[in-house]
Amino acid sequence: MKKALAVAVILLFIGVAVSPMVIGFEAEAVNDETEELLDNLAFYCYDESDNNMRYEHYKRQIQKDNSIVDIDEANEDGVLPVESFPVTKTGGLMDSAWPMLNHDVSHTGRSPYSTANVTGLEKWRACNFLYGWGGLEGGPIIDDDGIIYYGDMDHIFYAVYPNGTQKWKSDELVGPIRSTPAIDENGILYIGTIWAMPNYFYAIYSENGSIKWRYETGHHVDSCPAIGNDGTIYFGDWNGLIHALYPNGTMKWRFKADGAVLSSPVIGEDGTIFCGCHVGPPWAGRFYALYPNGTLRWQYNASHWVRVGPCIGDDGIVYFVSLDGFLHAAYPNNGTLKWKVQMPDAGTYPTIGPDGTIYAGWEELRAIYPNNGTIKWQFNPGDDRCIEGGAPIISADGTIYFGTRIRVTDGGEIIALYSNGTEKWRKMICNEYIDSSLAIGEDGTVYIGSTITSSGYLHAFGPVESNSPPETPTIYGETNGLVNEEYWYKIRAVDPDNNPISFYIDWDDRNKGWTRERASGENCSYLHTWKRKGNYTIRVKAKDVLGEESDWATLEVTMPHSYHSNWWMRWLDRFPLLQRLMGWFIW
């Protein structure tokens, strides 16, 4: 089923991506687009095992409002004119450990904090699911109190304390969340949604998760926001618009690009906004530099999509990748090319080390000298692995962290490298994929999201300061059943330190062993079949990441009957005396 779902996701993405990006929808086209979206959604969400509950859930959201934003004609510079609003301007990005995607408005991916004490030890993980159908594909950010914020594909937005316990969660957003939020110095969070109709861009109070305002975009928002020094918020959408909003949610301006804007904008020291877009078919890409008033400064024409966001070096040089398989370096004043270097598939965000080294890649991570674009080193994470959303980030001690996706949905790892490109450590953390950006806290904790069995998880790596053993697990499930029948058993245990835990399960039929790690307090389900009649005692204990073990929990199970594929024998199982009589006559 997983493989079939993975194929469906790929086909849906291709179908949506290659369809023409139409700007300026007419009102009569809305119903047709709604039906098309529902058809695509039904294809992606099809799962007969849950009676298509996932489809029905998202269908209700889409049908809440099927209006589309009408887009006026742009002027010759591509800027859509809007009425000017008097606004009291506020400050920009929060001064915190990690306030936005890739740390800062230049997308350097550079933390000022050391992670020298971080090994492969996962100190906690938070399990995030409401319906159990969404992964964590956007990344986390951190405010000046150390609170971590992120959204997931279950359209839930979370706030988590530094110890992994939940501060609040909000289900007020309409549509899944696939991007990384940003937070301003007043503690207001900004994020957009996808797969809703219409989609919105939200401002959220960090104190309690309530919505301050929402701004209708009319199409998916994959783009992660950036916040200027004056408080202006910038992001793109699939309508091909780059938006600039005042902090009160009114529009400052919007620029009409030549195709869908999935790219996340960055901001230069002089206020110039840099962002890319999709064009096609025929396939092409554009990379734009916009003045702070939204007019075009220059554009660079690439031979394929510019899908992800750029980064800016300390000297102002702008670096971006496109699906033409190159990393491009452009001068910020006029967009002329300084150099470009081959970067096969070129799928992940480029970032910049403290010495100016550029990191980017896909099937392998490459380190590039900034002066001439030559390769410093390259690292191959292994067969069938790629670096997708888990763009490389760099700590103050020079360690480079990134996430991988194994095939399509066969697992994901977090990998740490020394600054010379040799491997420091790695850990497999999920059974589906990693498409999340990373973050580093003030205490050096490294955060990354993942998708495990269609649910989103946030993982925290760092030293564990104190440790107590997990509490005794609880077990629930069938206690009187049939042999050769499959039965689900739910097992749960809480670790006082919120460490991840694994279970040792002895089924009392020679089948026993440790499970993969799970979140503390997570409800875990395990399937088992007994082959012989008898009385069995299930025994379970929990172990945390430091090896501390709980007491044993037990559950008595009786399997008195056999399961017969023949309906006549199954009927006879209900009448043991009749079975004996028939056996006597046959004998």
Image: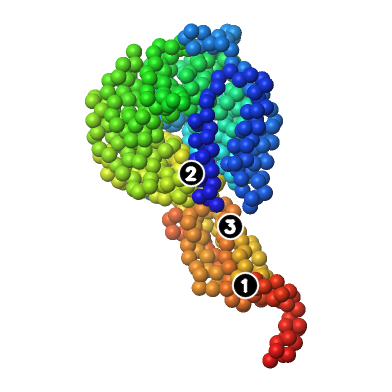
The quarter of the rendered structure image containing the C terminus is bottom right
Secondary structure under tag 3 reads strand
Above or below, 28 relative to 489:
above
Measured along the vertical axis of the image, is residue 518 above or below residue 534? above
The residue tagged 2 is 450
Circle 1: residue type: Val
Residues 541 and 237: in front is 237
Q: Which residue of the protein is positioned furthest toward the bottom in this rendering?
A: 587
What label does residue 525 carry, if any?
3
Judging from the image, what secondary structure is the residue with disc 2 in?
A: strand
Going by the numbered disc 2, the residue's amino acid type is Ser
* Residue 10 % position (x, y): 50, 40
Q: List x then y, in percent, for residue 558.
A: 65, 73
Closer to the chain start, of discs 1 and 3, is 1
Give the residue drawn at x 55%, y 19%: 23
Q: Earlier in the sequence, mark 2 or mark 3?
A: 2
State the image coordinates of residue 484 (x, y, percent, origin top left).
60, 70
The image quarter containing residue 553 is: bottom right
The reply to whether residue 243 is visible in this rendering is yes
Q: Is there CB contact under 8 Å for labels 2 and 3?
A: no
Image position, residue 253 (x, y; %): 53, 13
- First along the sequence among labels 1 and 2: 2
Residue 391 is left or right of residue 534, and the answer is left
| Nearer mark to the viewer, of 1 and 3 | 1
Give the residue displayed 57% in from the left and 60% down from the top.
526
Residue shown at the point (42%, 44%) measured from the top left: 405
- Does residue 7 sit above or below 171 in this rendering? below
Label 3: how many Cα within 10 Å (few below 14, some 14–19, many 20+): some
Residue neighbourhood size for the residue with mark 2, other residues' Cα within 10 Å, grouped as few (<14), some (14–19), many (≥20): many
Residue position for label 1: 483
376 vs 220, left or right, is left
Distance from disc 2 to disc 3, alpha carbons, whole Å, reads 19 Å
